[in-house]
Image: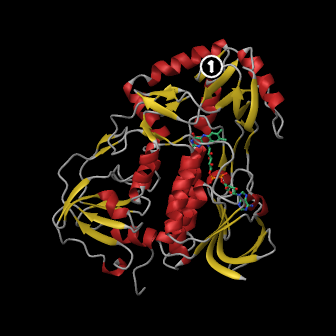
Amino acid sequence: MAEHAVVIAGAGPTGLMLAGELALAGVDVAVVERRSDQNLAGWRAGGLQSRTIEMLDQRGIVDRFLAEGQVAQVGGFAWIKLDISDFPTRHPYGLGLWQNQFERILAGWVGELAIPICRGREVTGFVQDDTGVDVELSDGKRLRAQYLIGCDGGRSLIRKAAGIEFPGWEPTTSSLIAEVEMAEKPQLGTHRTALGIHAFGRREYEIREGNVVYKDVGPIRVMVSEQHPAPTGEPTLRDLSAALVKVCGTDYGVHSPTFISRFTDMARQAAAYRNGRVLLAGDAAHVHSPVGGQGLNTGVQDAMNLGWKLAQVVKRISPESLLDSYHDERHAVAARVLSNTMAQVALLRTDDRTEALHDVVSELLGMDEPRKRFAARMSGLGIHYDLGEGHPLLGRRMPDLDLVTANGPLRVFSLLHAARPLLLELGEPGGFDITPWADRVQLTYAAYAGPWELPAFGLVSAPTAVLIRPDGYVAWVGDHSQRGLSDALTRWFGPPAGV
Ligand SMILES: Cc1cc2nc3c(=O)[nH]c(=O)nc-3n(C[C@H](O)[C@H](O)[C@H](O)COP(=O)(O)OP(=O)(O)OC[C@H]3O[C@@H](n4cnc5c(N)ncnc54)[C@H](O)[C@@H]3O)c2cc1C
């Protein structure tokens, strides 16, 4: 039986990101993926939020994604635009990039890290004991791992087999999505009328002055709401035609579909992200309506949170209890995503009263303070892990400051490329001694003279030193007294060497 430290079920966005994070930390990881190649049938996510873009920047791979996508103010709440161009980040925008492209580029990076992906095979079951997990595959083979991670999507077999509850809310709406030919050309763009929501587009587009301009060629991509939440099961061309007639009065002579699928606003979240040696991330841990474009982003960010923690546990640097912080931090984030998404679905109903409410919210979000607060939430830039009382940076993302070091100018994010923790000393040099953690934590002295500003929060006082986790969140803020530093180092990066 082949053995790996970690086996990941699913090479979607979450599984790929997690595999990359583990490999960067030097962990022996293998991925099992049902699809025979990375190609996705149809389409799903259409873009990345600012914080996800920042995280790719933290690993030095963001240019690959920026080169293929379209930078624009694509963020919104219930289709109400939220402009983040004034946010203090190097990436004050979203990126229009189809999930197919995103997965292809990410898989390229994973390939460079030489991570084995067993494609065309499924995880069909597992048995865990005190020391590891026996993972059963559809070809009859077995793998042995210390940990099994379910990144296997909303219908996660891993979640079900681990006996993890998935409570939440049943669907209230359903929509069809399809790629088709049409005899008559519909008006491209998104539409919300008293009869329902619908959108027409094409794969190829440009964003000009904030507006999506579709190419004139290629099949039509359709999204149309259904009158009643439809039963599960494969939708047909007849279903699509009927839904279009109800909402648009015509089906535009729809024919030759290459893909038809259905999504709903079902909202569910795993009650626990871990059961022993089995953990969940991405859609396996949370599902919700695609409105607001949060799913892929939340999954990729789950992976960034889990990767370094799991690596430290596998390498016996940290106790298993570090994994509990993965549940605590990421369950809270996805719970907020679910409630925000449910609010958006409610606001997008098309009756007159909801329309009036939508207008009111739109007016509110036009004001600076609410816009910033909701934009920080939707872009992921406002995520704040509860790491206790202290400086406002504690538990928030470290800004990508332009530093001056003995070796010349350097960006903070470039110090995170190898996914290693970082103690950044900004006052007088030489005050900090972290020798017992020197094998795990980098210590860098740098000068920075500019302002410290957090999205939607504003200016904060300049710290003397910050301890930054590999996922880019601040674990400790302090000064040369070093009060609390060794506790923070121990809590996040294991006990000092020799203890
Ligand atoms: C119409 C639509 C639009 C969307 N728009 C957006 C958007 O704009 N922004 C956004 O952030 N999100 C969006 N989403 C959500 C996004 O697509 C998902 O959140 C994202 O794909 C989740 O990634 P994942 O890796 O967790 O799961 P998945 O992408 O579902 O990947 C799971 C992988 O596991 C594999 N697998 C499943 N079972 C097994 C098994 N037993 N063994 C081995 N492999 C297995 C699957 O083949 C798959 O490759 C949208 C979704 C839909 C449906």
Mark 1 crowdedness (10 Å alpha carbons): few <14, some 14-19, many ≥20: some
Residue 474 occupies quadrant: bottom left
Measured as percent of width and height from the top left, residue 361 is found at: 52, 21
Judging by the rendered image, the residue that carries numbered circle 1 is 192
Residue kind at label 1, given as amino acid type: Arg
Q: Is residue 131 visible?
A: no
Q: Tell me: residue 330, above or below residue 78.
A: below
Q: Could you say which quadrant of the image residue 72 lies in?
A: top left
Q: Quadrant of residue 185?
A: top right
Side (left or right) of 58 relative to 402: right
Observer-nearest residue: 297 or 191? 191
Residue lying at 67% horizontally and 30% vertically, measured from the top left: 223
Please state, as top left, top right, bottom left or bottom right, where the N terminus lies in the image: bottom right
Q: Residue at x 28, y 45 (%)?
A: 460
Q: Position of 479 compared to 313: left or right?
A: left
Residue 7 visible to the viewer: yes
The image's colouring method is secondary structure
Expressed as whole percent of the image width and height from the top left, the position of residue 217 reads 58, 30
